[in-house]
Image (tube, helix red, strand yellow):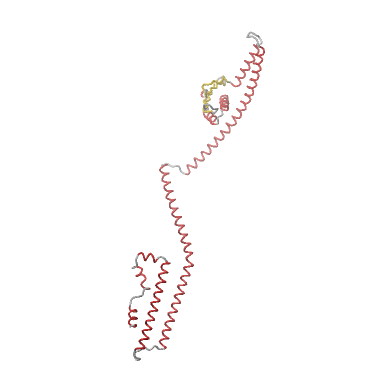
Amino acid sequence: MAQEFQAAFEKASLKIVHNVDQFTANADDEYDIELRDPELVAQDLATQTSFLRKLKFRYLEQNAKSKYITSIVSDIDDAAIVTAEDNNALAVVCEEKKEKLRIAKAALAEVRTNIRTMAPVVDKDYLKLKEEAARAAALSQKIIDGRLALTRLRHAHPKPRMTIPTAEQRLTDQVTEMQALTDDIEQASKKVGSVKGGIKSGTQEVEKLRAERAEADKAVKALRVDDDDGRLVPLYDQYTAVLSFHRSVFEAQGPEHVSENEVQLSYVVRRRPISINLIFHPNTKWLAAASVVGLDELGVDPSELVDSHVQINDPKGLVAAVLALARQS
């Protein structure tokens, strides 16, 4: 019976090792997913190995018992005689199988060692590739954003667009223009300085004349004479001469308050009337606007000069510059 079981076992298609692909193809999806986990595969392998070892031992034990019983209960002529040669042949086969097993175990150990050695390298390469992939995705997104921004700029600024040479030429022209404006500002500053010096000297003279007028007023009050007193005539002549000298120095006809925040200054320069209107911000001393009348006949445009002094809130400098420009024309 044992021989029949052995024959049936050898004839049966139980070569599971050679049918791994078929076994994997026929497996369920859930089981196939579980096979991907190395820890579960190791546990399953250990369980199956233990079961197969027990099955093999059970088979060998039953086969040995069957042969032993057969050799005892059967006749001597029919009993299988096991000789020393048979034992030696089985020993040789067993040694060959052991050698193959040893070689297979060594190859398996080498594969495991290689896996342990290469795993950190592969992991490092994987992380590097992952970072490169993320960087490539970010760069791709930046490229898309840049193209969208470029498209918006093209829609916002249709042709003809400014090219790089045109922009450079425009920058060069602007630098030249700024240098010319800087030179003009320097010249204007020099003129303003000279005009301020003249105004300062004139102001000192005015202060001197005011002091003399105050002294004359005090003298008149101290005298307390009648209108017909002849002593007033020299004082009147002196005051008139001083006033005429003051007007001749400043060429002024007198200020006129047009409104609460507007003052009109009238001058006569070289027998030409010049009028300067100064408009201030309400309730402040900040110059808001200004206009000059009388220089158009001389072919002079004082608009730039007026704007520059209005921006820096310099009414005194404006008056001095206008009078200097009128005297030079």
**Foreground residue among 109 and 148:** 109
Q: How many marks?
A: 0
Against 257, residue 39 (above or below) is below
- Residue 72 horizontal side relative to residue 250, left or right: left
Q: Quadrant of residue 44?
A: bottom left
State the image coordinates of residue 152 (x, y, percent, origin top left). 41, 44
Question: Residue 36 placed where, x, y %?
Answer: 40, 65
Hey, which residue is sitting farthest top in the picture? 228
26 relative to 274 in the view: left or right: left
In the displayed structure, 286 sits above or below 254; it is below
Q: Return the residue nearer the eye: 44 or 235.
A: 44
The spot of residue 208 in percent (x, y) is 65, 21
Name the quarter where the C terminus is drawn: top right
| Quadrant where the N terminus is found in the figure | bottom left
- Residue extending furthest bottom? 77
Q: Nearer the viewer, residue 245 or 177?
A: 245
Q: Position of residue 33 (x, y in %)?
A: 38, 64
Q: Nearer the viewer, residue 110 or 255?
A: 110
Quadrant of the rendered image containing residue 266: top right
